[in-house]
């Protein structure tokens, strides 16, 4: 495994527990209106206390990043969360990481099957996946999470935070299913697995970031590249 990629994963995966840190999250972001992103899911391992973000794509499935599984032993998902100081009961899951993920950029996507399907309501809803015939990435999108507000300093947020991002055309994206964006602001430690949302559709999954000369390069797994695999896993594991 490339050592730079390994270090990047460790930074994004930095373990935390409910209530740690200050009111921080997403570098340059601001606090989301409570429960305004009802598809967001907080994922916490009950043994390693490693945390990741995710989002609900079906009553019984959460999507996140495959590299989150590196430190997962007994993960639980928490639905309808705004402030981590007030977590509901966690739901146990079965993990389905993409078989092509090799601890490097590409195929960094995982589905978590809820052992108890979610009850949809005002604070718990599903976010739409892109259509296979129209997967054009828009430039004005939104990223969110419970991670740090400062690069190189881990201070996880207790509340969900978000940031409007303008995607730029970059050629160095490692793999065909990776969307890249270079900016001084964006996801940081603890934001792994969160969604890149464009026009209320999830287009990407926070995969990695790395320091560059004039900012940070963030890599998002392009969801549309994995629709066949997603549908296959969901079909095999129907409610």
Image (spheres, helix red, strand yellow):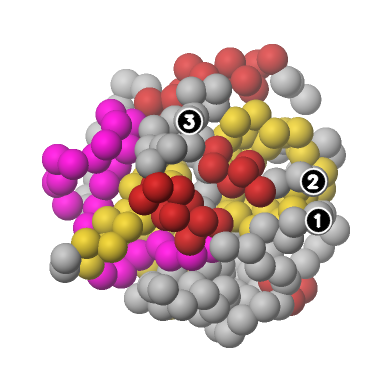
Asked whether, in this view, residue 120 is left or right of residue 229, the answer is right
Mark linked to residue 46: 1
Q: Which residue is the site of mark 3?
A: 102
Image quarter of the N terminus: top left
Instruction: Tell me the residue at 71%/69% (across/down).
Output: 17
Span shown in magenta: 168-190
205 within the magenta span:
no
On the question of residue 208 being in view, the answer is no
Q: Position of residue 150 (x, y in %)?
A: 41, 77
- The numbered mark, 3 or 2, whose residue comes first in the sequence reads 2
* Badge 3 element: loop
Residue 74 — which label? 2
Is residue 73 among the parts visible in the rendering? yes
Q: x, y (%) of residue 182? A: 22, 58
Q: Nearer the viewer, residue 44 or 203?
A: 44
Q: Disc 1 versus disc 3: distance between alpha carbons? A: 25 Å
Mark nearer the N terminus (1 vs 3): 1
174 sits to left or right of 161 = left
Q: Residue 169 has which mark?
A: none
Secondary structure character of the magenta stretch overall: loop
């Amino acid at each position: 495994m490339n050592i730079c990629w390994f270090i990047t994963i460790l930074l994004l995966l930095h373990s935390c527990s409910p209530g740690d840190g200050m009111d921080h999250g997403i570098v340059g972001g601001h606090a989301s209106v409570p429960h305004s992103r009802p598809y967001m899911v907080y994922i916490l391992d009950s043994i390693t206390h490693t945390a990741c973000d995710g989002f609900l794509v079906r009553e019984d499935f959460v999507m996140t990043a495959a590299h989150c599984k590196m430190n997962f032993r007994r993960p639980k998902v928490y639905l309808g969360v705004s402030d981590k100081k007030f977590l509901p009961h966690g739901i146990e899951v079965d993990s389905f990481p993409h078989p092509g993920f090799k601890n490097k950029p590409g195929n960094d996507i995982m589905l978590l099957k809820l052992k108890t399907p979610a009850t949809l309501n005002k604070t718990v809803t599903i976010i739409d996946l892109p259509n296979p015939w129209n997967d054009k990435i828009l430039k004005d999108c939104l990223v969110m999470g419970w991670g740090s507000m400062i690069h190189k300093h881990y201070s996880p947020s207790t509340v969900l935070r978000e940031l409007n991002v303008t995607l730029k055309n970059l050629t160095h994206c490692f793999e065909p299913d990776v969307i890249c964006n270079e900016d001084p602001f964006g996801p940081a430690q603890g934001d792994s697995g969160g969604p890149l949302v464009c026009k209320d559709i999830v287009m990407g999954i926070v995969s990695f970031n790395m320091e560059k000369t004039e900012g940070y390069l963030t890599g998002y797994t392009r969801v549309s590249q994995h629709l066949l695999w997603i549908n296959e896993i969901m079909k095999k594991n129907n409610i």
